Amino acid sequence: MIQSVINFFKTGSDAPRLDLPEAEIRRRYNVKRWIMFVGITIGYGFFYVTRLSLSVAKKPIIEEGILNAAQLGKIGAILTTVYAFGKFFNGVLADRCNIRKFMSMGLIVSALINLGMGFTSLFWVFFALWAVNGWFQALGSAPSVVTLSQWFSKKERGKLYGIWSVSHSIGEGVTFVCTAVVVSHFGWRYGFNAAGMVGLAMGVILLFMLVDRPRTYGLPDVHEFSKEAAPEQEEGPKLTLMQQQLKAFKYPAVWVLGLASALTYVSRYAINSWGVIYLQEAKGYSLVKAGAVMGVYPAAGIIGAAVSGFISDYIFKSNRHLSTLFYGVIQIASLVILFFGPKGILWLDIVGMAMFGFAVCGVITFLGGLTAIDLTPRSVTGAVMGFIGFFSYMGASAQDWISGYMIQKTTTIVNGQTMHNYDTVRYFWVGAAILSLILAMSVWKVKPRED
């Protein structure tokens, strides 16, 4: 049984090389890789739709007396904890898997779990389902970057990685705007159901858009196709893939980037997990208006992520550290506006949220993967992404657990409504962003490694 599952997901055997004119090889190669690129960009966004549905439903769930803030924090934390381990484990597997099957099935299962969330009111069922969701959510990011690395050259990777990163914002935008409208009009259960149905549809579509390695179709490796120099082999015995992966984990800069990314994910998931309820309770907005303000975040994030590669490659001459500093300063300023700015000034909150979306999507482009994969060989991209992802989502998990506890401690009943105070927790969220930038700057002198 286990062997059958392994055989189903593992990458296919190399097919005989196609004996076709170079122009036809190039046409087939480009058709496959550009359809795939659109697939991973849109498809990974829908992983976020099936992950953030709980964030929109939090206040209605609290108001119905089904769960409290501390319990919701635990549920959010179990997803990100399992997701952290899943990103590492599945990142290692992604280097060996058929990405078409691997990523598609992850989204399909996550969608089915969302459908299940709409039919329960029990804490332990929420907890268990969201834990399982965390594991299958981890079949999205590393596979996307692995297939990007398999089909595009290193010179193309920076710009395309930045464009692919808009997938986060696509999913967040659909969730914070569309799911919020569904929850506001039909209730929180329908929010989970809607997320599940659109996720399921997208998972099936991915089965037709994603691809395995080029050689499994009789096509050349990307370095041959792009006329890029083949990766140089180190002197001495040839390392196995596992040995290469373990060697990559020994680079100190990868560990520092992992810790910096973890702290960035504290502030990122402070907004993702608690932003809607914060805007409702601390700023006094309705659910629909809070969702609309939150909708500015992913919209600006699309711009921040999409231009990150161009900013890095053309403005800062491929210096990832200068790019991180640029985005990091804007991120900290935006959090100060959102958490310490005056109440009830809509335009200021919109500006702060737009700045945050633009900045955090740029920061995670670099700290969440691009800088690290620049330091390591293409053959271990999935493992390195998994390693960084593990740190990132352990940070997100700690955030949900700690934030939920701190927020629950401030619970009061105002005119029959459950309310919370955010005066203390906001220092935790802003402080994490500041420390993240300090750590990221500590590896300033580290240069990208050649394959």
Image (cartoon, grey):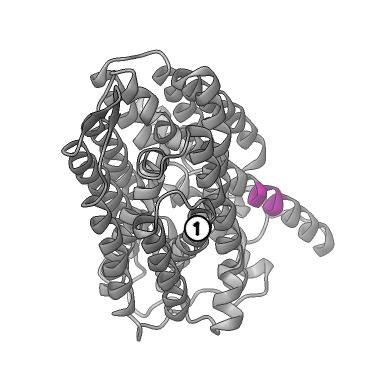
Q: Which residues are magenta?
A: 32-38
Residue 107 or 114: which is nearer the viewer? 114
* Left or right, residue 131 beside residue 365: left
Amino acid type of disc 1?
Leu
Q: Position of residue 117 (x, y in %)?
A: 39, 20
Q: Position of residue 320 (x, y in %)?
A: 46, 77
Quadrant in which residue 125 is drawn = top left
Q: Name the residue that disc number 1 marks.
A: 348
Was residue 37 drawn as part of the magenta stretch in this picture?
A: yes
Residue 20 or 152: which is nearer the viewer? 152
Q: Position of residue 28 (x, y in %)?
A: 76, 53
Q: Is residue 305 above or below residue 408?
A: below
Say what secondary structure mark 1 lies in.
Answer: helix
Question: Does residue 99 appear in the picture of this structure?
Answer: no
Disc 1 crowd rating (10 Å Cα; few below 14, some 14-19, many 20+) is some
Residue at horizontal 45 percent and vertical 72 percent from the top: 374
Quarter occupied by the N terminus: top left
Residue 81 or 381: which is nearer the viewer? 81
Residue 57 or 381: which is nearer the viewer? 57
What is the magenta segment's predominant secondary structure? helix
Residue at horizontal 52 percent and vertical 28 percent from the top: 195
Q: Is residue 434 above or below residue 43?
A: below
Q: Is residue 125 above or below residue 166?
A: above
Q: Is residue 323 above or below residue 57?
A: below
* Left or right, residue 235 beside residue 418: right
Quadrant in which residue 397 is drawn = top left
